[in-house]
Amino acid sequence: MKIFTQTIFCIIFLSLSILEIQAVPMIQTIDDIESKIHKAIVFSQGAQVFRTATIDVPAGLSELRFVNISPSINKNSIQCKAPEGINILSLRHRIDVLNKEKKSTEIIAAENKIATFTNDLQKLQALSKVLDDEEALLKANMKVGGSQTGVDASELQEVAKIYRDRMKAIRLEKLALSNQMIEINKEIADLKLILLEWNASNQEKSFTEIIIKVDSELSARKSFEISYVIAQAAWVADYDVRVKNAQSPILLNYKAKVKQYSGEDWENVKLILSTGEPYRNGDSPKMEPWYLGFNQRQYSLNFDANKNQLKSIGSYDPSIRNISGIITDSNGEPLIGASIHISGSNLGTTTDLDGRYQLNIPANYKNIEVSYVGYSSKTLPIYTRQMNVALDDGMLLDEVVVMGYSSRSKMRQKRFQTKDKEEAIIPAISTVEKTTSVEFEIKDPYTIKKDGKAYTVRLDDYELKADYEYYCAPKLDPAVFLTANIHDADQYHLLSGNLNLFYEGTYLGKSYLDANQITDTMSLSLGRDRNIVVKREKNMEFNKRKFFGTKRTDTRAWDIEIKNKKSIPIHLIIEDQYPISKEEQIQVDLLEYTEATIDPESHILKWELDLNAFEEAEIAFSYSVKYPKVRTVYLE
């Protein structure tokens, strides 16, 4: 009876288990779904990519696996637009590591050689340090004999010979070690280039899979749209500005430079360019407050912004308009593809194969940021035209090998250029204003390759009414700049960007359009005009120094001569300044300023002159500074 009861119990248990298994719904998997990119919204940095695919979805639960998608997507940004009658239950992604190419014997050998060369380099550096210590020891023990007995000539000659021979040997050994280290660094650089190419190629062969679990009411053929964000895309505004003469409207060609290196081509996609946040910038020199202090040499700097500048490097020089140099590591080896970026702007460049760079500096930007993968970044004031920077190692060698040779690092070596790409035909566009941005929707489909090169898209052409004036700040630069003031420019949705200047049919070079100006009128610098001459000289007759009691009074006087050599009348604005005291013991008084207007906060003087053809004029100003005669104040 007991055995019979146990048998019945087992049968019931198995029956219930089978029923539970049958109650669990079956999940069908649809693999290798190919989707097509049909739209891309490109931001100033990054892009949102939209893909579509049409799938035969069975009724019930199923898992859809979308393949061959960019390996560079932001996993948190993945979205799926569900068709009618389908519920999305979950969404995840993974990297398809099966498509990755295994390291070849050559690549493994290159990595091993880098490790060996690095070890050899460390040994040579250690030997060089030993020789440095020995040289210091010899120099510290040059004294021969006691203070009473002295030393005879033969002994002195023998000691001198020993010292000379050993010092000669040390110097030659150090020279040989230095040459060996240079050769090893060259070998390491060549091997790193091999790894760079392999890693870039390997990343292009890896893909992302997006896996979506859905529940469908009925079997049906449905279209799915998935979207995601990538960082490896950008667009910047670019302009051609043509001015016939100072009485004609400005012809503005509004263009966009679009690039992406996400690992997948955008073939005939609907392209939308989003403005994002505009950047501030400028071109012609602008006056800034000049603060006086004791024993303080600095050139027209804002005091609060200057507190954290590196005094050992040098102070910002607003007259510098271009810089160049070499970026190296701590051993003096050039860094290929290092980034040099103007702080607070979207302007920058990268170093070439020799570690060299060149960069134009717009007005009012004081610092550059230098960075490279695996090294500590540096922020420096723009204080000289030749800025060579050595970066310190920021991580271990193994980390640099892994992180420093991705396809993104490779793309950093490519300048944002279009010399081998033809400009696109002007497509029809529509402009959509959103809450925080403006979108330019290109009506015709467009192709942007994954090569990281800039593709030119022409957005629109405008004829802008402008008032022209000339500007000069002779303390900073005696050149006179032609400025066009454009009214109601906001209606054109312009962004800050580079522009090519054409004046009176002549190419003047590049400038920068600052679309982030707060005023209603946008000022556009059109370059220098050599036919207007401004000369600023110190008037020695009125430059005096007086002493009275414990005080000293210095007087400075400046004469500014202007000559209009043009055959037409001009309107000219000249700005200069006198210092602001930030010390109670320093008293500054403005003595003469010949019809100038004064900004009481910045102490900037402004003259507005209307000069006829070939007319000359002269303005002057002077000021005095009183301070304790035991202290020093620099007035130049």
Image: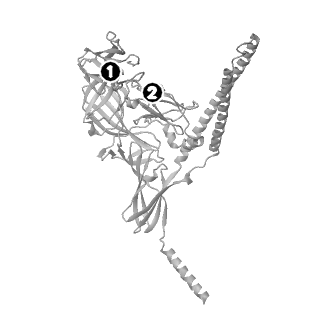
- Looking at the rendered structure, the kind of residue marked 1 is Gln
Q: Residues within 10 Å of mark 1 (few under 14, many from 20)?
A: some
The residue labelled by disc 1 is: 587
Q: Earlier in the sequence, mark 1 or mark 2?
A: 2
Asked if residue 317 lies left or right of residue 574, the reply is right
Classify 334 as above or below 591: below
Q: Position of residue 433 (x, y in %)?
A: 29, 46
Q: Residues within 10 Å of mark 2 (few under 14, many from 20)?
A: some
Q: Position of residue 610 (x, y in %)?
A: 23, 20
Q: CA distance from mark 1 to mark 2?
A: 37 Å
The picture quadrant where one finds residue 623 is top left
- Secondary structure at badge 1 equals strand
Instruction: Say which of marks 1 and 2 sits in front.
Output: 1
Quadrant, the C terminus? top left
Q: Is residue 493 visible?
A: yes
Quadrant, the N terminus? bottom right
Front residue of 202 and 574: 574
The residue labelled by disc 2 is: 323
Asked if residue 485 lies left or right of residue 270, the reply is left
